[in-house]
Amino acid sequence: MLIRSPKSSQLSENQVTDQKVYNNRREILKGLGYLGAGTLLTSNSANAFGLFGSDDKPEFQTQALSFKESPQLKEQTILTPEQKVTTHNNFYEFGTGKSDPVEAAKHFKVDPWKLTIDGLVETPVTLGYEDLYSAFDLEERIYRLRCVEAWSMVIPWIGFPLHKLLQKAKPLSSAKYVAFETLYDPQQMPGQKRRFSGGGLDYPYVEGLRLDEAAHPLTLMSVGLYGKTLPPQNGAPIRLVVPWKYGFKSIKSVVSIRLTDKMPATTWNRLAPSEYGFYANVNPMVDHPRWSQASERKITTGSLFNRNRVPTQLFNGYEEVAPLYKGMDLARYI
Ligand code: MTE
């Protein structure tokens, strides 16, 4: 059973999903019995529904998920409208403009998918497409994502803590870091064909965390947002979300997670080491060499003229991670 929702790119500003609509929709789905056990509730048979783009390829369709709702009181949280979350994106594999990915990724094929967890582990793990939604209990986490470009969004992510996946693989005591890699598929990801259109980045996009950062309970592998599977522009079918770090750490469309004893290379650090460090912890006291990080534009409405600037908080406000960096000079280890 496919629970079809309109493409977010077709929504107008006054149709953006606000807090109440999102909650109501969840109530309706619950009432219909869609939010039970199991997780992936629908099958992606775009073909059967005639959902073809103009060039005859099936368009990506998100699907409803079942998950444990966030204990956070949604009534007290102003979420960024879904329409904004899914149309204002950084995903250079699909173009460097914020509005490029929603369009360029609309035919992205994610099934079959293969995610491997290997390297310095006792038990290498491979997850296929269906496993992403069924191997772990899915839960909702409302996290702020603070982009290095000084804007932020508040998003109801759905996923599972990375440490649960790491536990399955049983890291060896020699493992100190975790290296992540995005899919490399220039046929599907036009930005990977030419460095110019891909922002000058080297592909595949790679990221890394220290093992203790990766194992922190806040670190999430996300497979959905706003009650549904991730749309391609947000990193379908699975991406990382590290809410206390600048958004570029939250690597999308992950195919490989490798445990290692060496600090892994990271895409933005490789391109501009003086601007982007390995740690990339949100820090209002340490400016980017070309702009201030002291405040951010909080994207809470669909309006282009939103002037909602707020002070940026250390670790994006997730102060429980401070012990991870005890004794470290955060101005040096950027
Ligand atoms: N992952 C890949 N593979 N490619 C990218 O270009 N952009 C990063 C991050 N993950 C990026 C990526 C940046 S700069 C940000 S701010 C976030 O994704 C944006 O996530 P969102 O579009 O879901 O808000």
Image (cartoon, grey):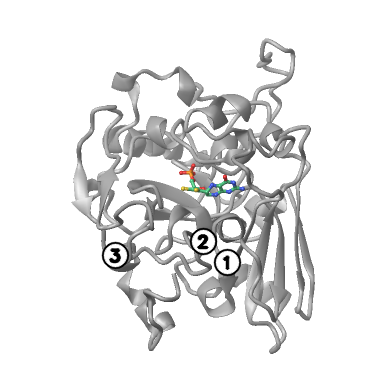
Q: Quadrant of residue 195?
A: top right
- What is the quadrant of the C terminus in the image? bottom left
Disc 2 to disc 1: CB gap under 8 Å: yes
Looking at the image, which is closer to me, 248 or 1? 248
On the image, the x and y values in percent for residue 170 come to 70, 80
Residue 220 badge? 2
Question: Which residue: 27% across, 35% down?
Answer: 20
Task: Count the numbered circles shown.
Answer: 3
Q: Which residue is mark 3?
A: 317
Q: Earlier in the sequence, mark 1 or mark 3?
A: 1
On the image, the x and y values in percent for residue 29 come to 45, 35
Residue 291 badge? none
Q: Is residue 85 above or below residue 219?
A: above
Q: What distance separates the C-alpha of mark 2 from that of mark 1?
A: 5 Å
Q: Which residue is mark 1?
A: 162
Question: Which residue: 39% across, 52% down?
Answer: 145
